[in-house]
Image (spheres, coloured by chain):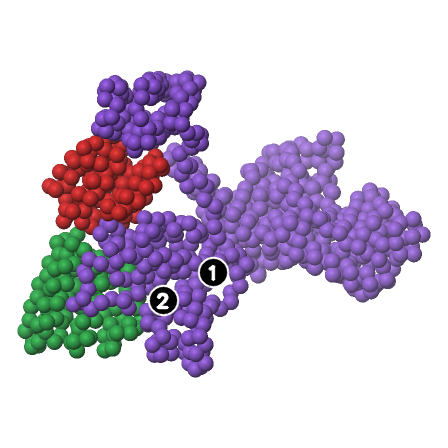
Chain colours: A red, B purple, C green
Amino acid sequence: MAKVIMTADDSASVRQMVTFTLKQGGYDVVEAVDGKDALQKLSSTKVDMLITDLNMPNLDGIGLIKGARALPSCKFIPIVMLTTESQDSKKQEGKAAGATGWIVKPFKPEQLMAVVKKVLG
Amino acid sequence: MIDQHRQAFKEEAYELLAELETSLLELEEQPDDVDVIGRVFRAMHTIKGSGSMFGFDDIAAFTHEVETIFDMVRNGKLQVTGRLVNLTLAARDQIRAMLDGADDGGGGDLKVSGEIIMGLRELAGFQPAAAEPPEAAAAGRKPANLATYRIRFAPSRDIFITGTNPLTLLQELKELGTCSVVAQTGDFPCLEEIDPEACYVYWDLIVTTDQGENAIRDVFIFVEDDCELRIEQVAEHTQFEEPQDYKKLGMILLERGDITTKEMEEILAQQHRFGELAVSNGILDQGKVQSALVEQRHVKEVRQEKQATEAASSIRVPAERLDLLVNLVGEMVTVQARLSQTAAQREDAELVAIAEEVERLTAELRDSALNIRMLPIGSTFSKFKRLVRDLSVELGKQIEMTTEGGETELDKTVIEKLNDPLVHLIRNSIDHGIELPEARVAAGKPAHGTVHLAAVHSGDSVVITIDDDGAGLDKEAIRAKAIERGIIPATAELSDKELFSLVFAPGFSTAKKISSVSGRGVGMDVVKRAIELLRGSIDISSVQGKGTRIAVKIPLTLAIIESLRVQIGEDSFMLPLALVDECVELTREDVERSHGRNLAHVRAQLIPYIPLREHFRIQGTPPEIQQIVITQVNGTRVGFVVDQVIGEHQTVIKSLGRAYRDVDGISGATILGDGSVALILDVPQLLQAVEAGQA
Amino acid sequence: MDEFKLECRQDPESRGKQILKISGGVTIGDAGGFRQALLAALEAASELQLDLSEMTGIDLTGLQLLCAAHQSAVRGGKWLHITDGGNLTFREMAAGAGFCRHTGCARDTSYSCIWVGGEQ
């Protein structure tokens, strides 16, 4: 059974690229348009990994990470955040909230796959 | 594919820009609305982030500037003013223009971008460094040497709640190279006390990789801030690494900080096996000793493996195995010839195509198999240097030997068989060629003579020349000696070339006395025969007083030769192509006209020919028109009369076996495509035999 | 990965010997329950056999618990041992995590370390 990865991003183009890359890599993908949407879907869908943008309306990435970690089903799953190079402090904040790792934007599909492999095995 | 993503981004960006416009106008009305400020920032942020993802770098760089300003607004460091809104609106229009022009390379006016950025920076009252381009991803990591690293990786207790599985990191590490893993379990609490969701284990890892330390650090990039991670290089496996013993156990433990110098000395003082003692004395946990032992073993194994691979880059193989390979390739060539012939006969296009493919592959296989046996002749040359030195001392001559083309490659067997003839030729040059120092000075030459040995490729042969700047051949002395020995009649008129070639006649020796160097009954005729056995030829030229040049021409290999296939009656014969000059017709009238003298007119030149049909006593009548294959041996053109010339042929040489070894005029045999046998003619010997028969 | 399942039974042939069969994949989510089951089984027996023949995966927390359980057994003067029925998945996972070793740790006073021997 394929592993399920959620991508939470308010940018449709980034979601599209992430989804496309992950599906190519043999994963199933659940898309969420912002933190709130993501958290809602997480409570009803079991996912093996979460990839989230940090800047999103309604509920931002940090909030989503904290919310996800509070869910029993997401307590130990890898959570990777998408950051831009200027957000080193955000990186720390994200880690403190329970993020497993990060991917710096812009990234290439190969880099995304490398990180997925690193945290998901 | 990427175009699809780019299109998606553009659509999204247009939407965002429309939203941005609305938000900015709203912001003008309510400059303090945090929600609106957040929306503007996010729109900019998304355009920047996604833009750079899909290759809109100029848009990303430009938007980055605007985003930076709004980050300040968001953090309360900058007030929203009418001018800021104006500039941002201008920036929005500029991004739109850049998007519109993105596909045809236009991409907006750089000047406008510059002005907007300047205005924004001015407003912010700071002078940020020029927008940095996004970091070049993994800028050309330098290739590192193969090295072994010792890693201690102790994750934090709560590593699991950040979603990290240390085992996947170990897995990633293993992909970098050879990896030994020892888990340290000594700190585990018992079941009653353990927190099942905490991490107690830590690892000692030994990795041998050529990716460098940074690649190892990259594995741990997400966890390095909150775990204990020590990476040390413990060995570098360079080309020049000494295969010495690896560090002692105590040393490893000391380096790791698992043991102090004092403790180590105490243990050493007890003269026992270090590891056992360290554990029994309670200084060390067994796991730590174990991992040090693993490190020792790991490095040892890596070194062994490396040596094995290095050995593999040049391997020593017994010569017989190569001979076997070449023989098999020979068989293969034969079978291939049969296949081609059969395919042609069947007129089956598919089979012909396959046969052609096999032919091409076989040719490649043959060349590379023969190539394996090729050795540079240089090592033989250097042996001669010593010979020249010793001989010149013995003879009281001053001789220098120079060499050229030592890198020229020849079949190993050929090189071996060339050794004796070359020694003989060099001895001759030194003994008979180079004069004593006094004589040289008297002749106006430098006191020390030179013997120059050179090898050069010439088609499918190698020409080895031995030049000396000695006295040269004495034509009159040769002539006199030849007459005296009855080799030529006293009245014979000979060209220089013919005269010189007399030195190769059996029993000829021009030296006044037999020295220990040359002579001793073994004459140049033996040398000549040896060269001919290698299917080579020898040529001598000389200018009296100036020196002599001997040129030995040797085919590259002994196993397979290009030859000309001819037919007499039902039988096929092979003539080495290297010796063949041309083919001409011989009609019955021609034969009658020459009155049994076996001479043919070829372009106003009289060429003697040998009718092979008669020579080999083959039954039957020759055809109306026979063919003369004209060969050139030692400067003489001689024809061989055959029924028919079939064509060029890749000839795999098979020796004739003991019973036929001494058959004159035949040097070997080969198997033809149809499985029948063809004999390979020993042209020089045939000539000799015929000449001897006539004399 | 198959679902994690625990099954504890009394060995019919030997009094005081419990057999705890662990099947499916052991993950961190199951760690708490796994620990409880191990504690209970050790409590009830003088000899505990862990049957891992149908285990389809084990993460680090599971490996740690096996080690800790062994330690508790040694301390309580009990015998804990593993049968894996040649389960390659388990062996590979234990070896991959670097748990396999030549000799037991310092606290393995009964020389019954579960990681000693077997495949290296």
Q: Which is nearer the N-term, disc 1 or disc 2?
A: 1
For numbered disc 2, what is the local secondary structure?
A: helix
Find residue B645 and report its image quarter.
top right
Residue B626 point in image, percent of width and height: 61, 36
Residue B568 relative to residue B153: left or right: right
Residue B393 point in image, percent of width and height: 82, 63
Q: Label 2 is found on which chain of the structure?
A: B
Instruction: Name the image quarter holding the N terminus of chain B.
Output: top left
**Looking at the image, how many numbered discs can be counted on the residues?**
2
Name the one closer to the observer, C92 or B473: C92
Categorize mark 2 by other alpha carbons within 10 Å: few (<14), some (14-19), many (20+).
many
Q: Amino acid at mark 1?
A: Ala
Residue B127 relative to residue B187: left or right: right
Residue B236 point in image, percent of width and height: 48, 58
Name the one closer to the observer, A91 or B633: A91
Q: In the rendered view, tell whether residue B335 sits above or below residue B312.
A: above
Find residue B301 and report its image quarter.
bottom left
What's the mark number on residue B235? 1
Q: Amino acid at mark 2?
A: Ser
Categorize mark 1 by other alpha carbons within 10 Å: few (<14), some (14-19), many (20+).
some
Residue in the picture at 81% in, 52% down = B450
Residue under label 2, please give it. B291
